[in-house]
Amino acid sequence: MLESKPPMGRMAFLAIILQVFSMCLTFGGQDPLHLNTGWTMRTGDNPDWAEPAFDANDWRSIRVGVPWEETGYTGYDGYAWYRLAFTLPAGWKQQAQDGFLSLSLGRIDDVDVTFFNGEKVGATGAMPPAYNTAYLAKRNYRVPTHLVRWGKTNVIAVRVYDGDGEGGLNGGPIDLKIPQLKDLIEINYKLNRANGIYSSLDGLPVTLGVKNHSHTDYDFDVTFELRNDRVDSPRVLEKIDTKVHVEGKGEATQAIKFAPPPPGFYQVVCTLKEGLKESMVFGYKPENIETDLTREPGFAEFWRQRKRALENVAPAYRVTRSDRSTDRVDVYLVEMRSYGNVRIKGWYSVPRKPGPHPAILSVPGYTSTMWPNLNRTNVATLALNPRGHGNSKDDVDPRGEEYMFIGFDPGHPEGYIYAGAYMDCLRAVDFLVSRPEIDETRIGVEGGSQGGGLSFATAALDPRIAFCAPDIPWLGDWAGYLETADWPQKNYPKLCETRPDLTFDGINRFLSYFDTMNMAAWITCPVLMSVGLQDDVCPPRTSFATYNAVTSPKEYRVYPFAGHGVWREHGKLKDAWMSKMLGVEASGL
């Protein structure tokens, strides 16, 4: 016989109904208020610009979600303020149960302090004089409801400082919304090792932090999964179930430990419940990853022939002084002929003081443009635009064609775009060696992303290179790239549509001629590599495939929370390293 439960009291029943109603309001799916238009901006810095009553009618309208350099502020570095006036629906007041609204501003380059109706609601990075960039961080701030003017005009003001490069509210979208559970519960990984790289035989420890911004206590069933780093065939290697209790307005941590995995990179996925999930990539003994080389027969001879072909092209250097010159640096436009008699160009910056000077060859990311370096007063810099990049499109202009597919003919790798791009880098070294003001024994190469791969290739193919500084490098371990990155999964089929005879394996065999992993053993100079541990564009495994094949003195830095971007703190470290390699003061780099 089943025992019947006592009837529920009316007040208890009403309490439950109210609780459910409250949860529906809090998590009930009120559409966000999109704030991507209507912004104005002014350069300079004035604390009065945070005040909602300030008259900004003469400020210039600006598009957000792109760097301010793309909206007319070319080359501007320094302070600027953004402002937006908007009306917040009065009906939101009853739905804001936890005392705040969620404001998402996307990425801001470099540093911001954000105000809502004149009150500071968040800041990321540090303003000068203790400047510390945070250009990769997404801004998510909580706006206390007591600051809100319901049904009336509200003002968001964002003070921005940009130290160099691109600036502004450039990473949108920008939204204001009623907080949902994922906004109330903040989960993140706390590092047991500063760089997220582990080597202990005891295993791979992981600590999760849970912060509760609501007034409600929560008990979560937590699942941790250790997954491989493959996107083509992801697999769970180990799973751990546990629980975590976090009190209202409180914090909690949960530590677990996975068994020691083989050397490699792994994704740890933590799930608290639907919509509450956080993942992070960790590394385990990456310097011990063994990747089989994929050299085709005749690999070395192929590159000897490419270099001989370059030697047969007269460089025909042409150097023209540029009005970009400053009182400390002379700038020149350099034009020259390269592999296949293709015209290429670059910007040559030379200190205005007696030489001979050491030199750095700077090479670009994928399809990006190099510009003169005006900040280096102790070294010369050649900012090269290889064929199809920047101002080097006279003879090779992609015109919307995917750059890495130009000249893709399995029967003729000598005509491939990267056969030419690699030789363009060597021709740039030829130029530097030809200059009487340059010390040819002190020439280094640097670059990020594609530029990191070009740096590896240049150091491998040209023994005149004195150091190699690749950041988040690409162009290595094509087979691993296909396994770990989304880009080839989406774009290789497009190539196969134009060449029905191709397969993914055939693409990788062709690309093996241009795989920096296969030529890394030829590098004889010191190497400093940087890697973003969360990089899903140039996954860390592919970078280490080339790095681990280098036999010369080498070192690496891993930035645990960085994606596909060079962590700016690495810039100072790299400058100090390069200045040591070149025997100059770091302050001039």
Image (cartoon, grey):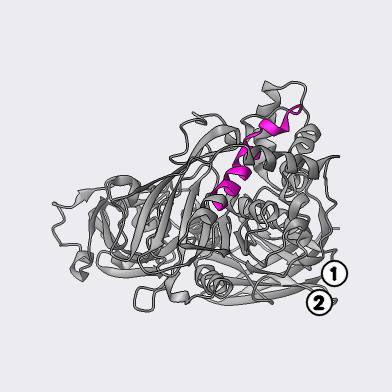
**Residue 424, relative to residue 359: is it above or below?**
above
Report if the CB atoms under discs 2 and 1 are less than 8 Å apart.
yes
Magenta highlight range: 410-429
Q: Dot 1 corresponds to which residue? A: 260
Q: Please state if 85 lies on the left or on the right of 537 as rendered.
A: left
Instruction: Give x and y (percent) for residue 499.
Output: 71, 22
Query: What's the residue type where badge 2 is placed?
Result: Ser
Q: Secondary structure at mark 1?
A: loop
Residue 520 seen in this snapshot: yes
Is 424 part of what is drawn in magenta? yes
- Residue lying farthest front? 436
Q: Give the residue displayed 23% in from the left and 59% down from the top.
A: 43
Is residue 415 rendered magenta in the image? Answer: yes
**Of 560 and 468, the residue lying toward us:** 468
Query: Whole-percent x and y of residue 336?
Result: 49, 41
Q: Looking at the image, which residue is at 22% across and 64% down?
A: 44
State which quadrant residue 96 falls in.
Answer: bottom left
Q: Residue at x 48, y 56 (%)?
A: 435
Q: Is residue 143 left or right of residue 309?
A: left
Q: Dot 2 corresponds to which residue?
A: 200
Which quadrant holds the N terminus? bottom right
Mark 1 belongs to which amino acid?
Answer: Pro
Residue 247 in the image: state x and y as whole percent. Answer: 58, 75
